[in-house]
């Protein structure tokens, strides 16, 4: 983080460096931009992971509901057969 602050305090800008890239081809500006965007990307990835975990929980709950509903339908079917036999 200290290096990030030092580069930013010296006026480093990913946009400015990408404009300079055509005049001075060097991988350093691209690496620095990736370095700056890493915390933001990490946060976004963690948000995606959390969303996937929530979705997984929803599907587990849905599976339980479907099983319960199947059991209820089996009982209804059984009762209908019993009424038909009587």
Image (cartoon, rainbow, N blue to C red):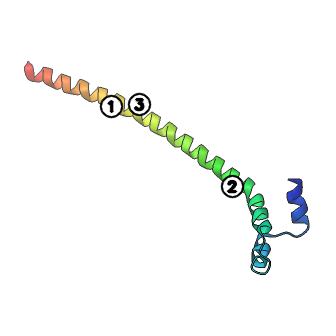
Residue 84 % position (x, y)? 9, 24
Secondary structure type for disc 2: helix
What is the C-alpha distance between the residues marked 3 and 2? 35 Å
User: Residue drawn at (39%, 33%), measured in percent from left and top?
Assistant: 65
Camera-near label (3 vs 2) is 2
Going 69% across and 51% down the picture, which residue do you hit? Answer: 43
**As drawn, 72 above or below 38:** above
In the picture of the structure, the residue carrying the numbered disc 3 is: 64
Extreme-bottom residue of the structure? 23
Nearer the N terminus, badge 3 or badge 2? 2
Q: Name the residue under label 2.
A: 41
Question: Comparing marks 2 and 1, which lies closer to the viewer?
Answer: 2
Q: Is residue 20 left or right of residue 46?
A: right
- Which residue matches tag 1? 69
Quadrant in the picture for residue 63: top left
Q: Which residue is drawn at 30% across and 26% down?
A: 71
Q: Please state if 29 lies on the left or on the right of 78 as rendered.
A: right
Report x, y in % for residue 9. Answer: 91, 65
């Amino acid at each position: 983080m200290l290096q990030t602050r030092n580069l930013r305090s010296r006026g480093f800008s990913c946009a400015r460096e990408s404009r300079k890239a055509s005049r001075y081809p060097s991988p350093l500006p691209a690496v620095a931009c990736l370095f700056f965007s890493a915390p933001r990307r990490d946060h976004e990835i963690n948000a995606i992971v959390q969303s996937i975990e929530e979705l997984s929980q929803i599907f587990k709950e849905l599976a339980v509901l479907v099983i319960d509903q199947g059991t209820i339908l089996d009982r209804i079917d059984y009762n209908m057969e019993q009424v038909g036999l009587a």
